[in-house]
Image (tube, grey):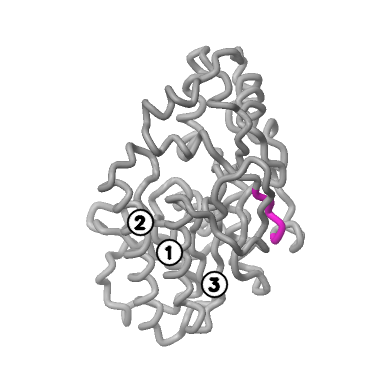
Amino acid sequence: MNFLITGGTGFVGKHLVKALHKGNHHTYILTRSPENKQHTDMATFIDYDYPVEQLPVIHGVVNLAGESLFGYWSKQKKDKILASRIETTEKVIAIMKQLDKKPDVFINGSAVGFYGISEDKMFTEETKQAGNDFLAKVVVEWEKTAKQAEPLEIRTIYARFGVILGKEGGALPLMSLPVKLFAGGKVGSGEQWMSWVHIDDVIELLLFCIFNSHVEGPVNVTAPNPMRNKDFIKVLAHVMKRPYWFPTPGPLFRLAVGEMSQLVLKGQYVLPQKAEKNNYSFLYPEVERALQQIYN
């Protein structure tokens, strides 16, 4: 099968492309600079102006591109976070509209930030009310843009990623640094929920969504056991064989990184109800086992 991928060179994208190649599928990876990439028998790099008529039948499209959330959230940075997601998604929709044979499935990478922030609410895919903070508003606009695929009769999935755990990308390297330096402890109150997921489960869940034709709509890509920050850091310190003792005060963390601090100081309790109802079996349902796989 042939898959069109955006963000194929990013953290999640690289893992997904590798998994698709392992399944003997060909990937067409959309990038702004294909001339700098190494083509292979299984991967073709193309730019956004590539003639659509020269593409073979595309069976699935996965949209993972977007400006990184990490960095100081100046107005310019926040504008980039939103604009990069909207513009890329609009380009992907335009390509799909031009295809004579429409893809069977379109997966739009999204985020649990849709639900907003809470220390006491539980969210599932049945939660329709979005939050009202910056990230929630970004996700709402992002998914609204992606929804244009539905009238094309393309099965559309909104993959709402939680905090992805992996050694070489995502939030974990940043979160583990204080622990590694023997200064690990809860951040802020430590009561904030963290809806985490191992990178291997992210990829397996995406493949599950691609190849199970009855799955559509929002899908929470999170493990079934969210943890509070204080408990997560405690397990992380144990796995890394480091002490758990120095808390990082919330005001100090906010002063250091600005509004982006909400990625760590705030959170939400999100359950992967749709994955479990469709009998997806998690590789890493418990955080200790997930972290052991990464660090041991």
Give the mark nearest the N terminus, 3 or 2.
2
Q: Nearer the viewer, residue 249 or 42?
A: 249
Amino acid found under the numbered disc labelled 1: Glu
Amino acid found under the numbered disc labelled 2: Leu
Mark 2 lies on residue: 82
Mark 3 lies on residue: 156
Q: Is residue 197 visible?
A: no
Q: Whole-Å distance between the Cαs marked 3 and 1?
A: 16 Å
10 Å crowding of disc 1: few (<14), some (14-19), many (20+)? some
Give the mark nearest the N terminus, 2 or 1.
2
Magenta stretch: give its range: 270-274
**Quarter in which the C terminus is drawn:** top right
* Residues at circles 2 and 1 in contact by the CB criterion of under 8 Å: yes
Amino acid found under the numbered disc labelled 3: Thr
Give the mark nearest the N terminus, 3 or 1.
1
Q: Whole-Å distance between the Cαs marked 3 and 2?
A: 20 Å
Q: Which mark is residue 141?
A: 1
Q: Position of residue 75 (x, y in %)?
A: 28, 47
Residue 141 appears in which quarter of the rendering?
A: bottom left
Q: Is-magenta flag for residue 133?
A: no
Is disc 1 placed on a helix, strand or loop? helix
Q: Position of residue 189 (x, y in %)?
A: 58, 27
Q: Position of residue 223 (x, y in %)?
A: 67, 46
